[in-house]
């Protein structure tokens, strides 16, 4: 049986197709753009095409993410925290702490071996602990978002950033540039700043091994490195980390459709 | 280069009817803020001249340029200034200042001068922070609350919106009232998120002015919560750049249910005025 999970994020929409609650058949992503419904349909069709399936083959669709209430096709919904934990434990059964950093949210949760959430903390109020922060900083440094992490890894210097707020940090970065700090050092400072925010959230709920990272920001190697250093723990990035929420939703869909 | 809508006009002023020559004390107050710098010169505690410019990447240079501009066109030279007090975010980086005083103290003192001794609550809405100050009839600070961690409720937040909507920052307030109906406030607190929310509203067909109205009222509400925590006692005065944004001020007045006091000078120079007045007191008490 084929089930699907749709993750309606703040910036992108992710779709995962799952067979018998076990095998990932396809993943697809689309920017939300101005029309989330059309974007979702596009992502869904792309996933079906990849798997060589038709809409009628999909038995159950579950949605998650900030915009889950407006997801087309979906029969039911699951919270982002719930979906993240399910997806993470499926990919890495020993995962007990899941840190999820997306475009406009940061989350940290503890879960049990079945992927059930025990405790969690969310920041959805402030860009300082979310992917948007990195985008602002990349803009201020005039580098591409994907260049920011590798740039930071080249630096061994610590310059403290005073600003937490993404808006203030942007002006601070400009000031640091004027003060002739290297882009590498500033990029590192930016990563230290966001990782500190996430770390304090992780500490609030507590963490136990294995600690895994999911969400788009975990594709940034310098962020991962800084989180490892901050937590002094082995932090593992799951494969295709930005799809873990959608995968979790597909797993919930399978369960709701009665797949054993 | 694209137009920068957040850029407000810099200016200077000299009193048309005051001379420094007969004055016993000529003092200078320099408020180097994170966004703007004001240099205020007072003769015997009366406003003689001032300049208001954007702060550059270096505080000492900004202070220096501000002083030069404040003196420009006057017959006053810097060696005739008896004492200078620096204040604001860059107060310790004013090379020619004799002393530094916090901007909280200076804004309360400046508001007392500009709005009169009946002022008990001063809201200073600056470029990168917002302070609510309770003071006595002498302009002495009794207590204060401050947000300098988050751009929501600060001038910087408004600049971001001016840029996003391509509306000159000086026109934001006025335009925000050109709506059929007052919209609900933007719901995100964070300026970054509010910006994406506003883009969504524009895509949904909201006219610019309606989005401005929604943001002005979000900012007014944000400031209201800060004021509520400290408690507002009349008279209530607003200093700093946003005091000039009627879109925020009028909505804040409505939420508070009271009217803001009218200043007898530019509300943005209150910190500099307070600093110059502190300088005068220090000279008079022989502590200079």
Image (cartoon, coloured by chain):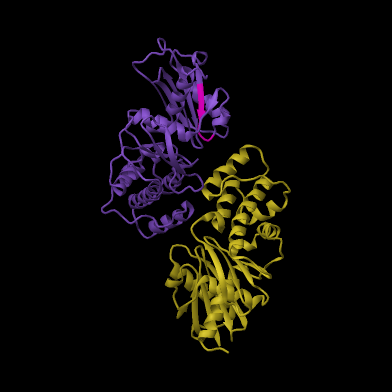
Chain colours: A yellow, B purple
B50 w.r.t. A10: above or below: above
The residue lying at 44 percent from left, 62 percent from top is A34
**Residue A103 quadrant:** bottom right
Look at the image and tell me in which quarter the C terminus of chain A lies: bottom right
The residue lying at 37 percent from left, 60 percent from top is B204
The residue lying at 62 percent from left, 76 percent from top is A112
Q: Is residue A199 left or right of residue A78?
A: right
Q: Residue A233: x percent and y percent? A: 71, 64
Q: Is residue B87 magenta?
A: yes
Q: Residue B12: x percent and y percent? A: 42, 25
Q: Residue A86: x percent and y percent? A: 58, 76
The residue lying at 53 percent from left, 49 percent from top is A165
- Residue extent of the magenta highlight: B84-89
Q: Is residue B47 magenta?
A: no
Residue A48 showing in the rendered view: no
A169 w.r.t. A103: above or below: above
- Considering every residue shown, the one lying at the far left of the view is B180
Viewer-proximal residue among A103 and B109: B109
Q: Is residue A185 left or right of residue A216?
A: right
Badge count? 0
Task: Name the dominant secondary structure of the magenta segment.
Answer: strand
Look at the image and tell me in which quarter the N terminus of chain A lies: bottom right
**Residue A197 quadrant:** bottom right
Q: Residue A131: x percent and y percent? A: 56, 58
């Amino acid at each position: 049986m084929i089930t699907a999970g749709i993750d309606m994020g703040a910036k992108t929409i992710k779709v995962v197709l799952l067979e018998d609650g076990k095998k990932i058949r396809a993943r697809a992503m689309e920017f939300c753009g101005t029309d989330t419904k059309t974007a979702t349909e596009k992502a869904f069709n792309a996933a079906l095409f990849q798997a060589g399936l038709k809409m009628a083959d999909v038995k159950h669709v579950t949605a998650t993410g900030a915009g889950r209430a407006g997801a087309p096709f979906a029969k039911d919904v699951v919270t982002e925290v719930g979906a993240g934990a399910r997806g993470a434990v499926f990919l890495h059964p020993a995962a007990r702490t899941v840190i999820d950093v997306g475009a406009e949210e940061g989350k940290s949760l503890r879960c049990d071996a079945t992927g059930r959430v025990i405790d969690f903390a969310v920041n959805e109020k402030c860009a300082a602990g979310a992917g948007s922060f990195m985008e602002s900083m990349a803009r201020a440094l005039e580098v591409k978002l994907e260049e920011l992490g590798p740039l930071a890894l080249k630096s061994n210097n610590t310059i403290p950033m005073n600003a937490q707020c993404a808006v203030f940090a942007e002006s601070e970065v400009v000031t640091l540039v004027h003060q002739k700090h290297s882009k590498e050092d500033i990029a590192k400072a930016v990563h230290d700043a966001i990782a500190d925010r996430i770390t304090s959230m992780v500490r609030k709920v507590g963490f136990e091994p294995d600690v895994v990272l999911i969400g788009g920001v975990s594709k940034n190697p310098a962020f991962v490195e800084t989180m490892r250093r901050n937590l002094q723990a082995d932090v593992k990035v799951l494969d295709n980390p930005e799809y873990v929420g959608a995968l979790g939703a597909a797993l919930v869909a399978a369960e709701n459709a009665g797949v054993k | 280069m694209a137009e920068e809508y957040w850029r407000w006009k810099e200016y200077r002023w000299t009193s048309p009817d005051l001379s420094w020559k007969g004055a016993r004390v000529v003092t200078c107050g320099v408020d180097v803020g994170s966004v703007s710098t004001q240099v205020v010169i007072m003769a015997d505690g009366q406003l003689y001249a001032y300049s208001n410019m954007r702060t550059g990447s270096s505080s000492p240079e900004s202070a220096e340029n501000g002083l030069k501009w404040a003196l420009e066109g006057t017959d006053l030279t810097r060696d005739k200034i008896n004492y200078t007090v620096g204040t604001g975010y860059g107060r310790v980086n004013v090379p020619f200042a004799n002393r530094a005083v916090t901007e909280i103290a200076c804004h309360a003192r400046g508001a007392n001068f500009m709005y009169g001794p009946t002022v008990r609550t001063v809201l200073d809405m600056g470029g990168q922070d917002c302070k609510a100050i309770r003071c006595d009839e002498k302009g002495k600070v009794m207590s204060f609350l401050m947000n300098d961690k988050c751009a929501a409720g600060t001038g910087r937040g408004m600049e971001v919106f001016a840029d996003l909507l391509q509306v000159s920052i000086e026109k934001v307030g006025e335009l925000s009232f050109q709506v059929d109906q007052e919209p609900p406030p933007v719901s995100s607190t964070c300026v970054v998120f509010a910006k994406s929310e506003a883009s969504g509203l524009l895509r949904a067909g909201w006219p610019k002015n309606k989005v401005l109205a929604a943001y002005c009222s979000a900012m007014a509400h944000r400031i209201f919560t800060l004021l509520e925590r400290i408690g507002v006692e009349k008279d209530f005065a607003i200093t700093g750049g946003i005091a000039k944004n009627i879109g925020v001020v009028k909505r804040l007045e409505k939420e508070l249910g009271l009217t803001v006091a009218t200043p007898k000078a530019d509300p943005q120079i209150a910190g500099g005025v307070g600093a110059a007045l502190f300088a005068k007191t220090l000279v008079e008490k022989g502590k200079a």
